[in-house]
């Protein structure tokens, strides 16, 4: 039987998203009480993000100019033959085909370069957004005033919400969630009295996850989870799967 790992040793695996789901949930709960692990996770996550971006090399913008410059170095005239000879006609046709092929290659290269540049920009943006959200989740879980409450969700899953009133943020942690039906998504809500306001969507592909809830917790007395059409709803369209009171 393998002994449970020391949670303090899982910072690197957590930063690289290499933990099993049960280990992830246990470690994120551990972060709420361990300032040193929180700081180490922030540093490792930032380092991993910088390394990933450094390994993404866009196509050099001067590559197209280099290809165009090479065209000038290619012999444009074929062997000298009589203008009336069949060789002259064949050479003229071959030259036109060669130039057309070069222009087509340059056009394809330009399109590929632009597409790769756009993909690189998108990857960089996604990595920065993911790193920012991970930092915010860690800050809420490790806040000095962080308080949590937990409940059982319909279907036997477990859910807990961690609130930091000093930072005016909340994190919802779920484990064992059933994957939603195709075209559906779990949506989180803040309850301001009888009014429910959207607080973010859960990833439909993950059964265990931590979600930074969107919006202020200042006026909220509770939160809920519903099953909504993909993309979410402005107001709940189904009965809540769970309702939790926010810790004071």
Image (spheres, grey):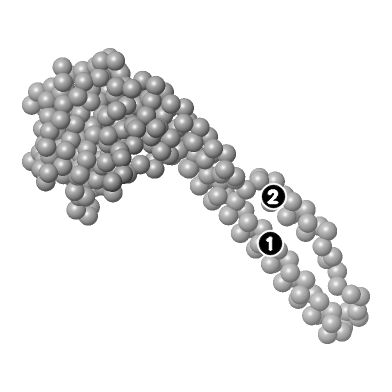
Between marks 1 and 2 in the image, the one whose residue lies nearer the viewer: 2
Picture quadrant of residue 106: bottom right
Frontmost residue, 228 versus 92: 228
Q: Count residues near mark 1 (Cα–Cα under 10 Å), then give few for <14, some for 14-19, many for 20+.
A: some
Q: Which residue is drawn at 79% across and 75% down?
A: 92
Quadrant in which residue 211 is drawn: top left
Which mark, residue 63? 2
**Is disc 2 surrounded by few (<14), some (14 to 19) or many (20+) residues within 10 Å?**
some
Which residue ends up furthest to the bottom in the rendered image? 86
What is the number of the mark on residue 140? none
Give the structural element (helix, strand or loop) at label 1: helix
Q: Tell me the residue at 49%/36% (across/down).
A: 48
- Front one among 189 and 69: 189
Dot 2 falls on a residue whose secondary structure is helix
Q: In the rendered image, which residue does mark 1 sit on?
A: 103
Residue at 58% over, 54% down? 112
Image coords of residue 187 (percent x, y): 20, 39
In terms of depth relative to the viewer, which is nearer, 208 or 101? 208
Residue 237's spot in the image, x, y percent? 12, 42
Confirm whether residue 216 shows in the render: no
Whole-angstrom CA distance, mark 1 to mark 2, is 14 Å
**In the displayed structure, does residue 69 sit left or right of residue 205?**
right
Relative to 73, 144 lies left or right: left
Residue at 61%, 59% (x, y): give it: 108
**Are the residues tagged 1 and 2 within 8 Å (C-beta)?**
no
Image spot of residue 242 (x, y percent): 11, 36
**Residue 149, horizontal then vertical, whole percent:** 16, 26
């Amino acid at each position: 039987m393998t002994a449970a790992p020391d949670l303090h040793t899982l910072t690197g695996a957590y930063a690289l998203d290499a933990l099993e789901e049960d280990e992830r949930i246990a470690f994120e709960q551990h972060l709420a009480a361990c300032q040193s692990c929180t700081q180490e996770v922030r540093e490792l996550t930032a380092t991993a993000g910088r390394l990933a971006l450094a390994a993404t090399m866009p196509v050099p913008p001067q590559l197209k100019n280099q290809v165009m410059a090479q065209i000038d170095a290619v012999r444009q005239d074929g062997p000298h033959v009589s203008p009336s000879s069949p060789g002259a006609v064949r050479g003229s046709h071959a030259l036109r085909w060669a130039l057309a092929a070069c222009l087509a290659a340059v056009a394809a290269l330009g399109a590929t370069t632009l597409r790769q540049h756009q993909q690189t920009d998108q990857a960089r943006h996604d990595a920065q957004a993911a790193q920012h959200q991970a930092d915010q989740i860690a800050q809420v879980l490790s806040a000095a005033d962080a308080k949590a409450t937990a409940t059982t969700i319909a279907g036997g899953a477990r859910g807990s919400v961690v609130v930091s009133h000093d930072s005016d943020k909340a994190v919802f942690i779920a484990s064992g969630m059933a994957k939603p039906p195709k075209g559906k998504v779990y949506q989180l809500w803040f309850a301001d009295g009888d009014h429910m306001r959207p607080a973010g969507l859960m990833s439909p592909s993950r059964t265990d996850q931590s979600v930074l809830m969107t919006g202020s917790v200042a006026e909220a007395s509770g939160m809920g989870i519903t099953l909504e059409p993909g993309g979410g709803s402005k107001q709940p369209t189904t009965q809540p799967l769970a309702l939790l009171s926010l810790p004071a």
